[in-house]
Image (cartoon, rainbow, N blue to C red):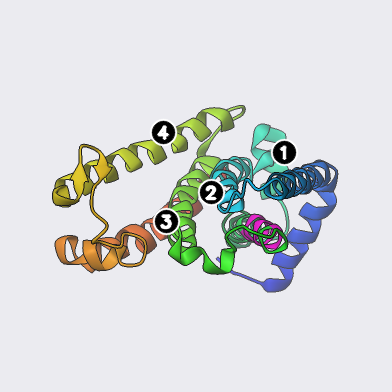
Amino acid sequence: MSLNINRVLNLIRRDITYYKRLMAPIILGFLLFNVVMFLLVNYINSNGNIQPYFWTNWFGLFIFIMGLIFTLNVFPEYKSSDDTIKYHSLPASNLEKYSTRWLYAILLFPMLITLTFALFSWMTPGVVKFSTLRNNGFGLGQLLITFTVFNSVALLLAVKRNRFKSIKDFFVVLGLLILSIIVLAIFAKLIFFQYFDGWSINSMTVNFTENFEEVIAPKFGRAILFIGKYLLPVLFWVVGYFKFIEKEA
């Protein structure tokens, strides 16, 4: 097991050459969509109907849907046994091959989406900028951490899956996301029942955006938060790596 930066760069160059015809229209389509949305929100704002959370709302949708779909397809070689054999025969270690695709799924693609939406929000007058997103909604950091947890599950499924399973795997991850939101909502209602009227928050005495961890921590402990946010993704990445090694056998 070795990790050589030059071999990793060679793998990246190989992937760019091999998949540029596939990725170019996807990236151009994504940018075109943002341009159309940019023109649309400017037109809406010019009529006095300001949409302050326009880009942040679309960002949350895109980072989860597009990010999970991308990660579930980050090993396109696994669509056929011949391509799988060819890919694992490349002159690089398993760690280098796995790290390259990890880099695409966990860092580069989410970073591309985040920077693109941040740029368009910065260019759009009258909307919430990403630089101030910490005080609005769930918070950019919390959103990206939550995405990373579910994206680590998607990466494991991408390694394990067989041909034509990406759609099924996407709904598996989506189901886990929905189930987690439901469980979180139930726990929030049970723990902070004094702030709820039915399923609606009836008090603003607790700032759930800025002090979320400070409110939760005394009841569950910072250790549980740390495990859920930081150790779970690492666990899925390590399991995914060993499943990746099994593909070579």
Q: In the rendered view, does 96 fall on the left or right side of 38?
A: left
Q: Which residues are magenta?
A: 111-120
Q: Residues within 10 Å of mark 4 (few under 14, many from 20)?
A: few
Pinpoint residue 219: horizontal percent, then vertical percent: 15, 61
**Which quadrant would residue 7 be assigned to in this image?**
bottom right
Q: From mark 3 to mark 2, how far is it between C-alphas?
A: 10 Å
The percent position of residue 176, horizontal first and vertical second, equals 39, 38
For label 1, the residue is: 83
Whole-angstrom CA distance, mark 1 to mark 4, is 30 Å
The nearer-to-camera label among 3 and 4 is: 3
Pinpoint residue 200: horizontal percent, then vertical percent: 27, 41
Q: Provide the residue designation for mark 3.
A: 138
The residue under label 2 is which amino acid type?
Gly
The amino acid type found where label 3 is placed reads Phe
Q: Are marks 3 and 2 in contact (CB under 8 Å)?
A: yes
Residue 175, numbered circle: 4
Q: Decide which of tag 1 and tag 3 comes sooner along the chain.
A: 1
SS under mark 3: loop
- Mark 4 or mark 2: which comes first in sequence? 2
Q: Is residue 161 left or right of residue 8?
A: left
Q: Nearer the viewer, mark 2 or mark 1?
A: 2
Dot 3 or dot 4, earlier in sequence: 3
